[in-house]
Image (spheres, helix red, strand yellow):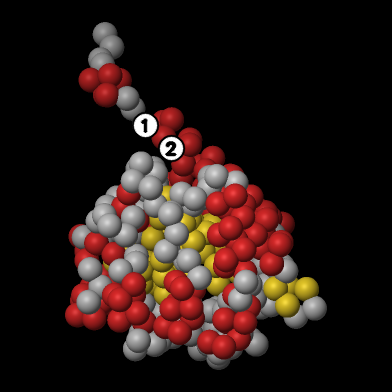
Amino acid sequence: MTEAFPAQTIPHLRPADPVAPVADPPLLMGILNLTPESFSDGGQFLANGAVDVPRVAAAALAMAKAGADIIDVGAEATSFHRPGVLPVPPQEQIRRLSTTLMQTRRTLDEHGLKAVALSIDTRSADVAKYALDQGVDMINDVSGGRADPAMLTTAAAAGCPVILMHAWQESPDQTPAPHSDVLADVVTELRQMKAAALVAGVKADRIILDPGIGFGKTADDNWRILRGISTLGGIESPIALGVSRKRITRDILPPDMQNWPHRDIATAIIIAAIASAPVAIFRVHDIRLAKVALSAVSRLKPSPATRTQTYE
């Protein structure tokens, strides 16, 4: 572990402290994919089949300077509904991460950004353990601890925060089936994931849950989850949410505005629209736009004085 998570910056992710169910303002998690096939930024950090480590570190630094609280680094694309996207063996993930994590941490520290945490985005316990040994602070598992039986015990032994995301199986040949009550189904399975983590020894204040927008859900399902996002507060764990550049952002954009920059704008609009919900972490590609969205929401909140003020 590094010296990340000083109490005054992000106390609810500090290993010694409980995770707060709600962050105000929410934390921003920047996305860094070291993969050739990620849906929006695949290959961005690769050169001749190898990871361009200085470029990764520079991107992480830029995100941190823009206001990222966490940098989430992944070496496996998990959009398995897309043709050609297949699971990446742990050994290959570790090869991609080798030297990258330590250099990224070192770069952040050298620029006075020790408070910015590093997260490993993986479904593999071996990869998670390797990353933690390299100084990463938390785990982000899109399988919710279900892909690798050792993931939850690995998180428990490390005592680190772990994001457990909900996902239904999907493939290029399998269209997501609609659910009559998708919110209830997702809440039930998130509760099951939390219970399994507790049984494995993960402390309750280390568990963060993610409803998994876009993972095996229909467009209508995704919007129903967002409309009922406040319901997830009843699970009594912090909520992480990722809508960045996903299919849901296309729904609110006209046909001639479907590129990634416009999807980043749509992402920021969605964040602003649900910022009052109990979401602790927003996972995004464009930190600056997300920061703008949260800034606008913050400025529009009534101050204590204006809440009680009346006009004749």
Is 85 located above or below residue 255 in the figure? Answer: below
Q: Residue at x 19, y 80 (%)?
A: 199
From this view, report whether residue 159 is shown above or below residue 66.
below
Residue pictured at 35% horizontal, 79% vertical: 154
Decide: is 9 above or below 140: above
Q: Does 5 sit above or below residue 84?
A: above
Q: Sort mark 2 into few (<14), some (14-19) or many (20+) by Cα contacts within 10 Å.
A: some
Q: Quadrant of residue 239?
A: bottom left
Q: Can residue 180 be seen in this view?
A: no
In the image, farthest residue toward the right: 48
Quadrant location, the N terminus = bottom left
Which SS class for mark 1?
loop
Which residue is denoted by mark 1 in the rendering?
301
* The image quarter in which residue 261 lies: bottom right
Mark 2 belongs to which amino acid? Answer: Val
Please name the amino acid that badge 1 sits on: Lys
**Whether label 2 touches label 1, CB < 8 Å:** yes
Observer-nearest residue: 111 or 270? 111
Name the residue that disc number 2 marks: 297
Q: Distance between the residues labelled 2 and 1?
A: 6 Å
Residue 116: x and y in percent read 49, 52
Label count reads 2
Q: Is residue 130 visible?
A: yes
User: Could you tell whether 310 is left or right of 250 in the image?
Assistant: left
